[in-house]
Every structure is written in C-alpha cells, then in structure tokens.
Image: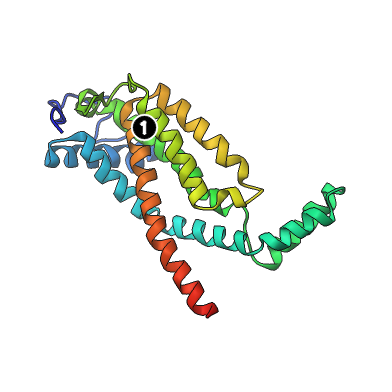
Amino acid sequence: MAGCSPTTPTKSNIDIDKPKGVWQTYFVVPLMKALEATGKALNSYGLAILVVTVGIRLLLLPLTLKQMKSSKAMQAIQPEMTKLREKYKNNQQKMQEETMKLFQKHNVNPLAGCLPLIVQMPILIAFYQAIINDKALNQADFLWLQLGVHDPLYILPVLAAVTTYLQSVMMGMGDNPQARAFLYIMPIMIFVLAFNFPAALALYWVYGNLFQMVQYYFIGDKFKAKREGAAG
C-alpha cells in the first residue's frame, strides 16, 4: 500500500461549513466529511473510500433485502411464466396481461430487483462531486492510481463492468424478463462512466459490488437454508 497516503488538503470549491441547498447539505458535504475524516485516520484515501462504501452499502441493506426477496419471488413463479409464454407466444398483448395478473396474484414487483441499482445513480453523482471538490482526495495516490483522474491502465473500468454484471447475475436479475435488459445495460453504462471519470468513482463502484456480492452470498445462503427447512 506504499504511496497511498493522502496529500495535504487544499481549499474546496464547496464550503463544507456553509453548504448551499439540499443536495450539498445532505449528500455531497456529508460524503466529503466522511472521506476526509476516514482518509486522515487511515492515512489512505483509497482505504477511506472502502470504509465509506461499506457504510453506504449497509445503509442500503433494506433495499438489498427487498431486491433479494423480489428475486426469490420471481424465481418461484418462473414455471408459471414459462407456461404463459408458451401458451400466448403468438399473442404478446394477452401474454403481457396474463403476466401482470400473475404478478398481482403473487404480490410480485418485477422492477423491485432494479431498485438498488437505480438508487446508486444519485449516490454516484454525489460521490463524483465530492471527489472533484475535495482537492486532497483528488490529488491522492492509491496503488497505481491517482484518484482524481481516470485509470490510465483501464483496469478499474473493466472491473467495474464485470463486477456489475456478476452482481446482477448473482442476484437473479437474468431470471426476470422485465429486468433482464439491465443485466447488459448497466455494465455498459458503468464501464463508460468509469472510463471517463475519476478513478476514485470506479474504485467506489468496484468496492461496492464486491461487498454486495459477499453480503448476498451469506444472506442468500441463510434465506436458502430457511426455505429448505420450511419445505422439509
């Protein structure tokens, strides 16, 4: 972790003590303060991003649990959905109507699985603004990276896209026809963002994906054990 220490802080474009508007007050400035305090404590802004990422993911845990519940529900009704697709393969409108009735019958929201990914978009924007306005983080080095500029080796953009795809597959998004497009659209979007924006932003996304996959592995395993126990 040599060369990971933050640089000397300089004046930010955002007044941390007097933020303007709801966006700065409740999103950007809290992120800046958390990153700055953690970066000084750990003497590494790269590790500070990890700590803050874990904190954000824990705050989003209720949405993650909702996403998992939705994925399990979608998997449970897949046999019925397959029958509908076969029965109404020549009548798309009727198939859609019957599919919606099936969702209502089982109280399934087909888009609930996409909610955590959608919520990540404003967080990404807030993180980006925190990065460009925190000069210390902007100029800090971590591993082969300068956190304020894009990865010159393009390793992080690839990792961000791949982990986004793997996370989506792991959480069953590919089993949901209504959300399947996100399985491919999101990795492409994230690759483009990580390719063009500061490495700190891509690092946040990779950390978050890895944490959520580990989290899903353990929580999903418990849900599976409970379901098998109930079935037994």
Q: Residue at x 46, y 40 (%)?
A: 164
Q: Disc 1 marks which amino acid?
A: Ala
- The quadrant holding residue 4 is top left
Residue 100 appears in the rendering? yes
- On the image, the x and y values in percent for residue 51 come to 25, 45
- The quadrant holding residue 159 is top left
| Count of residue discs | 1
Mark 1, secondary structure of its residue: helix
Q: Foreground residue, 16 or 129?
A: 129
- On the image, the x and y values in percent for residue 189 come to 51, 31
- Binning the other alpha carbons within 10 Å of mark 1 as few (below 14), some (14 to 19) or many (20 upward) gives many
Q: Residue at x 77, y 59 (%)?
A: 83
Outermost residue on the right side: it is 90
Q: Which residue is mark 1?
A: 202
Asked whether, in this view, residue 170 is left or right of residue 60, the answer is: right
> In the picture shown, does residue 104 fall above or below 118?
below
Color scheme of the displayed model: rainbow
Q: Residue at x 41, y 34 (%)?
A: 160
- On the image, the x and y values in percent for residue 45 come to 20, 34
Outermost residue on the top side: it is 152
Residue 20 appears in the rendering? no
Q: Residue at x 24, y 29 (%)?
A: 134
Outermost residue on the front side: it is 232
Q: Quadrant of the N terminus?
A: top left
- On the image, the x and y values in percent for residue 87 come to 84, 57
